[in-house]
């Protein structure tokens, strides 16, 4: 049994597939690819997988992460190389799902969500709403000591969840936000705080940053 | 609107929509081609939402088959749900195909499937959203050809003015022929009327505008007059003499739909002759696939889809000749894999329990049986003779093998049925749950599904009236009262929905204006109980000077000409009438594999019937000599 950490992109039509549905999509992709999967023990065995933080519906993911345990070496003693696995998976994937990289890990290491520290996002504001003062708004946000917001009836401080914001031209910026359990920065919340309509922006999660040594 | 504009537009609002994944395409096995390299672009249209449309086997067959031809690009389109429709209309977004986001009116051919009648208003809505003129008469050379098929089109008349051509019966060969004819016509740059005439030369294709109904003063049909002498008086359904191999590629949806499974048809047609069963009469003759072919198809489909569920489809699984062999092979092959294999329509006998258990590999679940009736009289009348002993014996076996839940399907409102007959349904159910309690105590569960009978065209009951809503409600009340006991759950169909199904399936061409008015006044998704609007329909009838009772609630005369009589299923009207009369005398008719009673189907398809020694022979006797010509006044 080998644990594989797959880096993949989720884009185009697959942006509209929910986190839960994506897990079933993955299961079918791997079954189609003929990869021997590890199942959980118990009365209702399920494919063993370790997921990262959900990507909200409609957002693009450039380097999402998911862990699977493959039964390699297989009965013939073969363990395919990462490139071959990537190619096989990509052949069996629906539009909008594409493997970027695969690395192998020791089977019983930390769960994915416990090793993710932050995530980087690219936020592109609808050009029709093009703001003249994006840099000012960024500076204003960063200068506030506390940004109190309410999300799902819970009050929280957005400010410590923002690590960086830097503009990329007049209608886009990148931001690094916390991506830890109970400390999840959301760029759509940030957009709203900056006075932009979040639904008309296009948001891309560029990558996760893992804790040192992971 | 150009495809890329539609794509861009969607991104602006899809997040506000429920299940946006329905509207974006990109599924595994969805076919992409270059529009410039194909000759004919076809939209396969299902007039209900994506979730119900993707699992539809009929469209999956055509999608696979048509896309093998490099000259054809078949794409898919489903009915948008109400929230999506509202956004599309507000934003001026046309209905588009999922693969290329092309507006529907830019297609060459739009092919609808109508598996049941309650989808008719959705079909109109899709044409409207696709900016295709609703009435065939208003379309010109630049509009797509609109065709339709499916079980509901065995009575095409209510939809006749909206559809350019119907493909009656099985489309595996006919669809391709329609496309070839379309290509030739398009290359020749001729008028639309000529296209319809050419299409009507294809066996099984019915171009309704070339036929004019003439009515008696009482509103019944006098005759259907072909516009040209060379047109056939009756349109014989199309069949394939040998079932072609099952589809090789299935579109695998990325969102969750109702059935995430591989469906493989093991057999088409049924020899049982249950007199209420539309499918049983219109899909004759019985044709089986070989075990080998089925196993190959399943294996390929599982590998290609990644599904872990298989459904083996037929009207009567137990009648598949090699059912034991098939089940054994499936068990051998897939016992190690975590597969869920479903085999619907098993006969009510203990052998079925063995089959079911072998397939399930011990995974408990529910068990479904369909006795339909509980009294001897009704059973004889519908020709589904399952004795109560047989049912209770089977139930005993099911419960004692560890299953705790049984589902039984019954039908009420059958011809000649009395309140006493309905009481017997309840009594039977009480006996069933008693067995369950004896074996499992309070954990035993009986779910009873009680549907209401609708007399369908092309069946022996086509002369019958649908029972009126009050009587149905009274019968339902009896069941509700008698089955008020722990462990029994009863569900039934809404009498209004039954009424609706009845007039829709039995209508004539004048019904088309009722459908049109109802749609204009807001009827759609009629199959969805929350969305069915009876008042809108009744108003539409009134506006057209028609009544639903004329279609639904009238016992029809023995010599009445029906709006669907010019559609020939191969089974003669004489056979149907004979069966109806037997039904009224409570006379059974044995499975026709045990003795042909000359329903007419082998005579109708004599030229293409495989010989008696062919491995793919039908169960019908082969008529060797040319019979004396009989004048068949249907």
Image: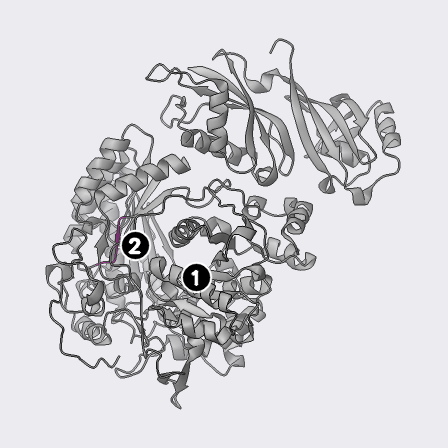
Q: Which circle marks residue B403 in the picture?
A: none
Query: Image point 32% across, 52% down: which residue?
Result: B448
| Chain of the residue that carries numbered disc 2 in the rendered image | B
Residue B392 falls left or right of residue B557 = left
Residue B402 in view of the camera: no
Q: Nearer the viewer, residue B159 or B233?
A: B233
**Disc 1 or 2, which lies upstream in sequence?**
1
Name the spot of residue A99 as percent of width and height, x first: 54, 27
Q: Nearer the viewer, residue B286 or B61?
A: B61
Name the spot of residue B172 as percent of width and height, x first: 35, 57
Residue furthest to the top in view is A213
Name the spot of residue B96 as percent of width and height, x first: 58, 55
Q: Quadrant of residue B272?
A: bottom left
Residue B123 falls left or right of residue B336 = right
> Of helix, strand and loop, which mostly describes the magenta segment?
loop
**Residue where numbered disc 2 is placed:** B409
Q: Which circle marks residue B179 in the picture?
A: 1
Q: Few, some or many C-alpha atoms within 10 Å of disc 2 (few <14, some 14-19, many ≥20)?
A: some
Q: Quadrant of residue B298?
A: top left
The segment highlighted magenta reads B266-270
Residue furthest to the bottom in view is B217
> Is A69 part of what is drawn in magenta?
no
Q: Disc 2 on helix, strand or loop?
A: strand
């Amino acid at each position: 049994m080998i644990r594989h950490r797959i880096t993949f992109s989720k884009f185009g039509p697959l942006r509209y597939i929910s986190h839960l549905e994506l897990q079933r999509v993955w299961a079918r992709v791997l079954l189609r690819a003929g990869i021997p999967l590890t199942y959980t023990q118990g009365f209702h065995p399920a494919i063993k997988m370790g997921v990262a933080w959900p990507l909200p519906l409609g957002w693009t993911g450039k380097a999402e992460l998911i862990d699977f345990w493959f039964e390699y070496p297989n009965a013939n003693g073969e363990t395919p190389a990462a490139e071959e696995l990537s190619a096989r998976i990509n052949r069996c994937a629906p539009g909008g799902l594409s493997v970027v990289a695969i690395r192998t890990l020791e089977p019983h290491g930390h769960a994915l969500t416990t090793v993710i520290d932050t995530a980087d996002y690219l936020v592109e504001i609808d050009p029709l709403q093009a703001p003249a003062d994006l840099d000012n708004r960024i500076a204003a946000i960063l200068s506030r000591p506390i940004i109190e917001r309410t999300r799902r009836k819970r009050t929280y401080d957005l400010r410590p969840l923002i690590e960086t914001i830097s503009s990329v031209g007049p209608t886009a910026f990148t931001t690094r936000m916390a991506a830890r359990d109970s400390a999840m920065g959301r760029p759509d919340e940030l957009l709203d705080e900056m006075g932009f309509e979040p639904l008309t922006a296009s948001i891309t999660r560029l990558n996760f940053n893992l804790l040192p040594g992971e | 609107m150009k495809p890329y504009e539609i794509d861009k537009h969607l991104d602006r609002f899809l997040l506000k929509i429920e299940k946006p994944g329905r509207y974006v395409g990109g599924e595994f096995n969805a076919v992409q081609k270059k529009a410039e390299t194909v000759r004919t672009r076809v939209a396969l249209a299902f007039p209900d939402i994506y979730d119900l449309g993707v699992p539809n086997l009929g469209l999956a067959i055509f999608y696979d088959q048509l896309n093998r031809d490099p000259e054809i690009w078949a794409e898919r389109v489903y009915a948008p749900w109400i929230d999506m429709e509202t956004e599309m209309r507000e934003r001026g977004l046309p209905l588009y195909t999922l693969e290329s986001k092309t507006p529907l009116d830019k297609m060459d051919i739009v092919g609808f499937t109508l598996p049941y009648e309650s989808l008719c208003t959705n079909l109109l809505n899709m044409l409207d959203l696709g900016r295709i003129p609703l009435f065939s008469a208003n379309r010109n050379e630049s509009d797509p050809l609109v065709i339709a098929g499916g079980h509901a089109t065995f009575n095409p008349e209510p939809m006749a003015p909206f559809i350019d051509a119907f493909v009656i019966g099985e489309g595996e060969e006919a669809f391709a022929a329609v496309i070839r004819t379309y290509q030739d016509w398009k290359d020749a740059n001729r008028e639309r009327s000529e296209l319809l005439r050419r299409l009507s030369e294809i066996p099984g294709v019915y171009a309704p505008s070339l036929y004019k109904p003439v009515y008696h003063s009482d509103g019944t049909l006098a005759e259907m007059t072909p516009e040209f002498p060379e047109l056939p008086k009756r349109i014989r359904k199309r069949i394939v003499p040998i079932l072609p191999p099952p589809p090789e590629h299935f579109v695998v949806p990325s969102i969750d739909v109702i059935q995430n499974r591989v469906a493989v048809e093991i057999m088409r047609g049924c020899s049982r002759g249950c007199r209420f069963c539309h499918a049983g009469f219109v899909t004759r003759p019985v044709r089986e696939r070989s075990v080998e072919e089925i196993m190959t198809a399943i294996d390929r489909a599982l590998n290609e889809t990644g599904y872990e569920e298989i459904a083996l489809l037929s009207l009567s699984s137990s009648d598949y000749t090699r059912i034991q062999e098939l089940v054994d092979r499936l068990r051998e092959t897939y016992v190690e894999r975590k597969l869920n294999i479903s085999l619907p329509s098993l006969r009510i006998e203990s052998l079925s329990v063995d089959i079911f258990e072998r397939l399930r590999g011990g995974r408990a679940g529910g068990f479904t049986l369909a006795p339909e009736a509980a009294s001897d009289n009704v059973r004889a009348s519908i020709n589904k003779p399952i004795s109560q002993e047989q049912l209770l014996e089977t139930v005993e076996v099911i419960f004692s093998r560890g299953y705790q839940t049984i589902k039984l399907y019954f039908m009420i409102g059958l011809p000649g049925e009395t309140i006493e007959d309905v009481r017997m349904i309840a009594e039977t159910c009480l006996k069933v749950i008693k067995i369950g309690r004896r074996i499992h105590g309070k954990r035993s569960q009986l779910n009873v599904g009680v549907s209401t009978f609708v007399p369908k065209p092309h069946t022996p009951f086509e002369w019958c009236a649908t029972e009126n809503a009050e009587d149905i409600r009274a019968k339902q009340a009896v069941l509700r009262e008698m089955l008020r006991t722990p462990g029994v759950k009863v569900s039934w169909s809404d009498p209004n929905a039954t009424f609706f199904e009845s007039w829709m399936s039995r209508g004539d061409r004048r019904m088309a204006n009722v459908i049109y008015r109802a749609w204009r006044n807001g009827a759609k998704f009629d199959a969805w109980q929350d969305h069915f609007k009876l008042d809108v329909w009744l108003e539409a009838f009134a506006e057209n000077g028609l009544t639903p009772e004329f279609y639904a609630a009238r016992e029809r005369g023995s010599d009445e000409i029906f709006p669907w009589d010019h559609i020939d299923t191969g089974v003669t009207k004489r056979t149907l009438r004979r069966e109806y009369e037997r039904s009224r005398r409570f006379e059974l008719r044995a499975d026709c594999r045990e003795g042909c009673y000359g329903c007419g189907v082998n005579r109708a398809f004599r030229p293409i019937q495989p010989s008696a020694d062919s491995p793919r022979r039908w169960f019908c006797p082969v008529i060797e000599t040319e019979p004396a010509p009989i004048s068949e006044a249907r």
